[in-house]
Image: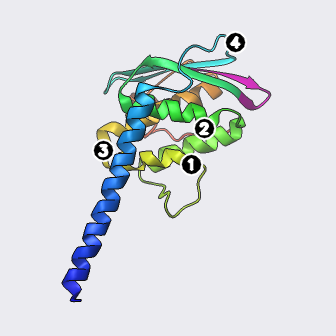
Amino acid sequence: MRWWRRYSECRKSLGSAMADSRNLYQEVILDHNRKPRNWGVLADATHKSEGLNPLCGDHIYLSLKLAGSNIEAVRFEGESCAICKASASMMTTLVKGKSQQDAEQMVNEFRDMATGKLDTSKEPHHLGRLTVFAGVRDLPTRVKCAILPWHTLHAALHSLTTTSTEADADPLQTPVIGT
């Protein structure tokens, strides 16, 4: 087989893998947008925060209940785009039962993945299925949509009542510091 045929076959295979990745991303986003997990108000919340992304119009409320340093329960609600809602839905599922320290580590890892600083295919991480959001790094206008729930979780864990993706509170400009 000539080299250009092999090259062509490799490109087709790579293109197919990238299409599969995009399809999975779209399926996950649509599923969590239609049926968000942990949606609603947490009546006995110990920590709450409101997150705003004026650029997209995302406006979410996150509430959680800490038992010691562990996240016993977490819920969210609000108006947001599909990416923000799916990110919040998957985030709440992943951090429930985790320690505050583990949740902060995931906040940092998710932000780094979404901004292209963490290559989840080559570097260790704790994000599990959330790696479907890795492609958001190629959509600059959507990075803040995906990060808003995580920034809001960070704010709630530190008893901050509101946070935003703009100005001084911008999660891309302000380093997220663990506990």
Give the residue displayed 56% in from the left and 44% down from the top. 108
Considering the whole magenta stretch, tell me its main secondary structure: strand
Cβ atoms at labels 4 and 2 below 8 Å apart = no
Give the residue displayed 71% in from the left and 34% down from the top. 97
Residue highlighted by disc 2: 94
Q: Which residues are magenta?
A: 62-71
Disc ID at residue 44: 4
Cβ atoms at labels 1 and 2 below 8 Å apart = yes
> Could you say where residue 146 lies in the image, as x and y percent from the top left?
42, 36
Of the 4 image quadrants, the one containing the C terminus is top right
Disc ID at residue 81: none
Cβ atoms at labels 2 and 3 below 8 Å apart = no
> Could you say where residue 16 lies in the image, as x and y percent from the top left?
30, 61
> Could you say where residue 135 lies in the image, as x and y percent from the top left?
37, 49
Q: Earlier in the sequence, mark 2 or mark 3?
A: 2
**Amino acid type at mark 4:** Asp
Marks 1 and 4, Cα distance to the nearest angstrom?
28 Å
Along the viewing direction, whichever of 160 and 50 lies nearer the viewer: 50
**Amino acid type at mark 3:** Leu
> Could you say where residue 21 lies in the image, as x and y percent from the top left?
37, 53
**Amino acid type at mark 2:** Leu
Q: Residues within 10 Å of mark 1 (few under 14, many from 20)?
A: few
Q: Residues within 10 Å of mark 4 (few under 14, many from 20)?
A: few
- Of tags 1 and 4, the one toward the viewer is 1
Marks 3 and 1, Cα distance to the nearest angstrom?
21 Å
Q: Quadrant of residue 158?
A: top right
Disc ID at residue 139: 3
Q: Is residue 65 visible?
A: yes
Of the 4 image quadrants, the one containing the N terminus is bottom left
- Of tags 2 and 3, the one toward the viewer is 2
